[in-house]
Amino acid sequence: MNPIYEVLEGLMRRYKKRVPDVSKVTQALIDQNVIEKEEDISNDHIAFRTMGLPNLGIQSFEKIFVHYGYKVEDDFNFEAKKLNARWYSPPEASLPRIFISELRVNELTVGIQQIIGKYTKDIITDPVDELNLDNARAVDQFLHSPLWSAPTWEDFKILQKESEYAAWVIYNRYYLNHYTISVHDLKEGYNTLEKFNFFLKSIGVILNDSGGIVKKSADGFLIQSSTVSQLCNAKFANGEYHEIAGSYVEFCERKVLKKFEGLPIKEIKREHRREGFEVGNADKIFESTNLDQIKKRA
């Protein structure tokens, strides 16, 4: 079996502990007889955040997933947020897509670059190159082990003022940023994002309203929403604890492409639906971890 399955299991196990909304939504779907078990949910994609620095960033992190058969697809540029991103299609239809973003650190102010450099300066070789990528347990351990020391609360706050993304990565590192429920694979009444968001609100899930609760691509065939990030009690340098943004859940509806609209519902597969990602949607989804969103959980 492809080691990716064990890696994903490790990612999801830890992620669910950090993000209670995952179990909340899953249990509500079971209670309302939408699904029988958690495994009935299709995972559209998972996402990671990285620092765009030598020996780090997309060029390093993607080696893990390319090794497992993932194929490099499109690149994206988020100008205002100073981010690059790339997505990867899976080797098997049952696996989620991968979305990796990186912060263009060299475009930040000198003071911010110096703070980031203080924590990352000792990474002088690519840590992924030292991994045995066929050892899923070692990869799982790597993804949940810090590559640098915990930041001070003061440094975190300074980073947050210029780049909330930078602050998130300097503390959370490679923790899974989010996973995504494919609502179009659910049964009638829950299989459009409009209906699913109504369900989410009915069970008390708080949604990110940056750019509107629903984010829709220009062609109208990719529709996305996300929760407001869970708060985590984070331990900073000197033993200080503060509540900060952790991870969140995304919800995605990929509509059937026009040329396949005549297919019977039971015959519709992943390749018949809108593929890829959209900068306009993702730009606002990123803000699920921003201060103006997470204050709704306070």
Image (cartoon, helix red, strand yellow):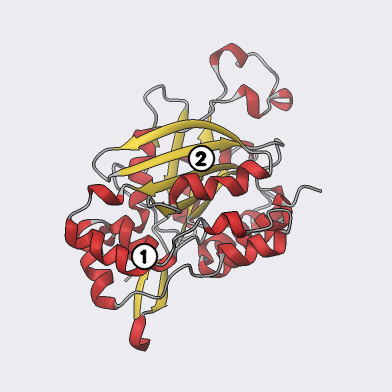
Q: Is residue 243 left or right of residue 114?
A: right
Query: Mark 1 or mark 2: which comes first in sequence?
Result: 1
Report if residue 190 is visible in the image. no
Q: Is residue 58 left or right of residue 111?
A: right
Front residue (pair 270, 119): 119
Instruction: Describe the element under mark 2 as helix, strand or loop.
Output: strand
Front residue (pair 197, 249): 249
- Label 2 amino acid? Cys
Q: Quadrant of the C terminus?
A: bottom left
Is residue 51 depicted above or below 85 in this figure? below
Q: Is residue 116 left or right of residue 75?
A: left
Disc 1, disc 2: CB below 8 Å?
Answer: no
Q: Position of residue 178 (x, y in %)?
A: 50, 54
Q: Disc 1 designates what residue? A: 121
Q: Position of residue 271 (x, y in %)?
A: 64, 25
Image quadrant assignment for residue 243: bottom left
- Label 1 amino acid? Lys
Which residue lies most toward the front here? 124
Q: Position of residue 224 (x, y in %)?
A: 44, 40
Label 2: how many Cα within 10 Å (few below 14, some 14–19, many 20+): many
Is residue 44 depicted above or below 172 in this figure? above
Instruction: Describe the element under mark 1 as helix, strand or loop.
Output: loop
Q: Disc 2 designates what residue? A: 252
Label 1: how many Cα within 10 Å (few below 14, some 14–19, many 20+): few
Residue at 28% across / 58% down in the picture? Answer: 164
